[in-house]
Amino acid sequence: MKNLVSFLFAVVLFFSCNAQNPIVSKQNENTNKPKLVVGIVVDQMRYDYLNRFYSKYGEGGFKRMMNEGFNCKNNHFNYVPTYTAPGHASVYTGTTPKYHGIIGNDWYDKEIKKMVYCAGDDSVQSVGAETEDGHMSPHRMKTTTFADENRLFTQMRGKTIGISIKDRGAILPAGHNANAAYWFYGKDKGLFISSTFYMNNLPNWVNDFNKSDKATSYLKPWNTLYNIETYTESGSDLNDFEGGFKGKETATFPYDLKVLKDQNGGFDILKATPYGNAIVADFAIAALRGEQLGQDDTTDVLTVSFSSTDYVGHNFGVNSKEIEDTYIRLDKDLERFFKALDEKVGKGNYTVFLTADHAAIDVPSYLQSVKIPAGYIDTKAQKNMLNDFMKTKFGATDLIENVSNNQVFLNRAKLKELNLDLETVQKAIVNEIINYDHIDKAYTAATMGATSFTTGIETLLQKGYNQKRSGDVLYVFDPAYISYSKTGSTHGSSLNYDTHVPLLFFGKGIKHGQTLRKTEITDIAPTMSALLGTSFPSGAIGQPLEFVLN
């Protein structure tokens, strides 16, 4: 009898423990999730900036992420074109323009026969200022972001807020069902605005921030943070490779922004200085408090894009004193942002990743001066040559509707009228333009659709090619040849100078370490989804970086 009682007690204890295990596991699962995920995109940040300016960084910004978190040193974009809008979309959707549909910052719409902007939406109105700059939404992005999936998973309890100087830098990362996206409207206002896609009125905390006149406080002299003589990681301050500001004879420090603003777009001048990043950091910190982000056990998502690095790079170039000072100051802004996260959300309660939407080339005229093959493309001359060819070959001047983003769009109606075969015309254009100076490769849309590439630039082109939105012919320039002014840097190619960008993780659920294993930009969103235990974004093709996660 005693043995029977002991046996029954053991059976009851066994089933009781097993019945409780799912509850314990669920509690452990919830406590392992961060209260807040912060995604940071630094616009136009090359990977080598982490190393070039390392000695100038403090301990609380970039170095904190490297020292406490995980550094993926060989992280690349896996498609072209490497532009801002496709970059932001790809980081957060885990897929490429082939699937998410954001094939450029703007592109030629074959249906309505005109250029469209990636975030433009005439069905919504501006909130915060009477301007068309607020007619924006993510409606042209076809797939979900990991922030969208977190909202769905939490029954909309988890918040998503997007913040940037650029509208596309705020809107595309936040996704389709975000609570809000805010971007900076400069000109004569200096305010953060939104659109009716998200809300009808700005929240009180945003109105309070705008009323604080923070933007005006940054209309001040911009000089180097440290003695300019110590900026040995960049070229000379006075050179022939930089643009500068209207109203100042040379692109040299210092810049009196208050004096220069009227000739440079009013408050828009801040965008091309480190102070544009500073005001984004200010606003992001205000959002932590205003939206009560990370204050409960349901994970929130905050996306922050620092865009001024891109404006400075385009204006002054990647080897300028201005870009070095901008990154030194951004490091300080990151440090105070991380301190605010420590204070408001708590150390160990949040997870951060930092990457870029693309990198950038050295100014070709500078490369030429140091004997590296580089140069500039006269796209107008190429278009004239192509039109002359089409007239001679096919007897028509209006067979080409548009040439943009290194793509040729054909007039399908005219082809049909002249009884011309589409693929034959595409091949003829490829065979023509491949002979033009500094066009390195060209492919037809038929080739992109029928051939499965696995290596080389062809693979990257194919992942950037969207069958419905892309052109009839795609082409690429020679390495280090660009269609741009002879001052400042740009981007867009499949070359390492445009594709190699930082990828840093730190915070809750992240291991400490580093790797030279190749990672791709589309791996970020699945990694965040895996951390949160949610569904992957609808079009994601990347893989979770398991070696990054605890």
Image (cartoon, rainbow, N blue to C red):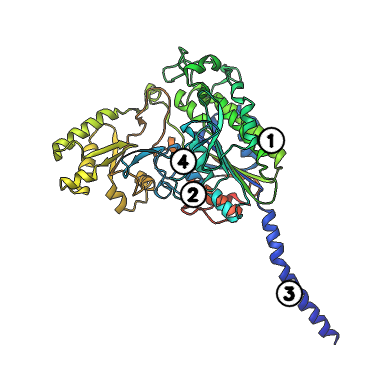
- How many other residues sit within 10 Å of disc 4, few (<14), some (14-19) or many (≥20)? many
| Residue found at x 58% / y 38% | 201
Report the amino acid beneath label 3: Phe
Dot 4 corresponds to which residue?
Answer: 87
Q: Is residue 185 visible?
A: yes
Residue located beneath label 3 in the image: 15
Q: Which mark is residue 94?
A: 2
Regarding mark 2 in the picture, which secondary structure is present there?
Answer: loop
Does residue 206 appear to the left or right of 418 in the view shown? right
| Sequence-first tag of 4 and 3 | 3
Look at mark 1 in the image and give the residue it sits on: 339
Which of the 4 image quarters holds residue 140? top left
Tell me if label 3 and label 2 are in contact, CB under 8 Å: no
Evaluate if marks 1 and 2 touch, with contact meaning CB atoms under 8 Å apart: no
CA gap between label 4 and label 2 equals 10 Å
Give the alpha-carbon distance from disc 3 to disc 2, as whole Å.
42 Å
The secondary element bearing badge 3 is classed as helix
Residue with the most extreme top position: 249
State left or right for residue 304 relative to residue 539.
Answer: right
Q: CA distance from mark 3 to mark 1?
A: 47 Å
Query: Where is residue 350 shown, x and y percent of the image?
Result: 66, 45
